[in-house]
Structures are given as C-alpha cells and as structure tokens.
Amino acid sequence: MANLKEIRNRIASVSSTMQITNAMKMVSAAKLKKAQDAITAMRPYANKLSELIQNLSATTAAEANPYGVVRPVQSVLIIPLTSNRGLCGAFNSNILKATHELATQTYAGKEVKVLSIGKKGSELLAKRMNVVSTHDEVYDNLTFATVSPIVEDVMDAFVAQTYDEVVVVYNKFKNAATQIVTTEQLLPLVSEGEEENTATIDYIYEPSQAGILTTLLPKSIKMQLFKALSDSFASEHGARMTAMHKATDNATELRDQLKLTYNKARQAAITNEILEIVSGAEALNN
C-alpha cells in the first residue's frame, strides 16, 4: 500500500506541474501575439531607415559621420540580449555560447567588454567576462525612449575611442518555434554592398545632406538596438511557449504512465488479497 501511496503522490505532483506549464504556455502565447505584431510592423521602417542612411553615408564626407570611422580593432564591446526569466529552452544558453565564441575566437587577443541586457545573461557573464554595465530593467518597459540612453552612452564611448567595435548578439524572431542566433555590428556603421544601387538615386535634400545625416544617424543606431531588443523579446515568448507546450505534453505522458502503473499495482494488490483470503479459507477447511 505504501507503493500505491507513493504513486498517487507522484500523479498529483505531475498533474499540478502540468497545470502550471499549461498556464505559462497560454500567458506566453498571449504576450507573443503582441510582441510579434510589434516587430513585424517595425522591420519595414527600420530597414528603410538603414537603406537611407547607407545612401547618405556613401555620398557624404566622412567628417559628417563620426559613427562610421573604421579603426584597427583593439577594444570590443559585446551586447548580448538575454531574458530576465528562465523556462524558455535554449534561448539564453545559445546567446551565452555565441558571446563566449565571439570573445574567445573572433576577438581572441582583443580587449573584450560586455554590456549585458537580461538578468539570465548578466548573472552568468559576470562570472566569466568583464561586464561593464547591465540594463536588465529595459524589459520592464521596452520602448524606444528607454533604449535611447543606453545607445547614447555606447555611441559616446565609440566616438571617444573607448571601443573600436560594438556588436549585438540576440535571437532573431522567425516564428514561435524558430529563433535564429544573430550577431550584428552596431558600430562602426558599415555599408552592405548596396552603395552601387543607392548612390545612383538622385534625391533632393533639404536643408542639406550632411544636416539630415547628423540627425538620422543617432536615430538609426538607436533603432537598430531597439529592433534587436524587440526581436529578442518576441523570440523569448515564442521559445517559452514552445518549451512549456513540450513540458505539458511530457507531463501528460508521464501522468498517463503513472496512472497505468498505479492501476497495475492496485490490481496486483487486490489479487494478492484475494489469494490470501482463499488460502486462509482452504486452510480452515482442512
């Protein structure tokens, strides 16, 4: 009977866990819809702004673009975007692995520093790498206004030659089940081979090409990080929804197996009791 009681307790425990994972899946599904709509609406604007900046940069003097200065890389700032909460599969571990590979392979021998966004990354990276600052509170109110001060500090440090290169590592949202680990160079701004196509477009600029570039450059850089954060935010909920869905399915399967085991053990116990009764009756008759 003690064995039956243990199995009943396990069934109750698994059923309780299944209810929790199912509730978390539903919450993440609701948040994913809002985050997915936000990043889907943002991408066309961000891409067009980047295209315009490339066109302006290709035909403007380098002095007007202090964020496009390419220097020999000696100091690098990596910005990994993780989540503040766990239970989202390999979402955070993939970012930490990519960050470690950048520091030890791509930028081996360079001075590598980290600006971490997301508690899960901040906690682990602080033990392994030189974390200069953390901004885990961004996810509490993810807006362009809250991201802007972070990017401004990074841009000022780049212009002051504190860093020669700044890269962002994040999960790019594809769909609820697929997140692509992406590494993007935030600074310096570099062209992507589109100058031949964009430089031939004859725009009329007002007040001036350099003036527009001075205004749009900081906004474009801020938008790039904000887009990466929005991508990461949507990817987090997609990963958590998928992880909790699998956890719920596994809990359901385990519960069914435990119920089957319980029924078999119960039937065996009943059979043994019947055999004991029959044996006792026969002993009395003899």
Image (cartoon, rainbow, N blue to C red):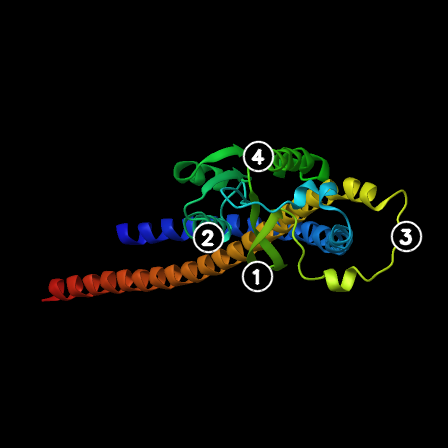
Three-letter amino acid code at the position of disc 3: Ile
Three-letter amino acid code at the position of disc 1: Thr
Three-letter amino acid code at the position of disc 2: Thr
Mark 3 to mark 1: distance in Å? 42 Å
The residue at the far left in this view is 286
Question: In the rendered image, which quarter is residue 262 located in?
Answer: bottom left
In the rendered image, residue 263, in percent from the top left (x then y), is placed at 36, 62
The residue at which mark 3 appears reads as 204
- Disc with the residue nearer the chain's start (2 vs 1): 2
- Disc with the residue nearer the chain's start (3 vs 4): 4
The residue at which mark 2 appears reads as 106
* Closer mark to the observer between disc 4 and disc 1: 4
The residue at which mark 1 appears reads as 178
Q: Is residue 1 visible?
A: no
Residue at 12%, 62% (x, y): give it.
284
Helix, strand or loop at label 3? It is loop
Helix, strand or loop at label 1? It is strand
The residue at which mark 4 appears reads as 135
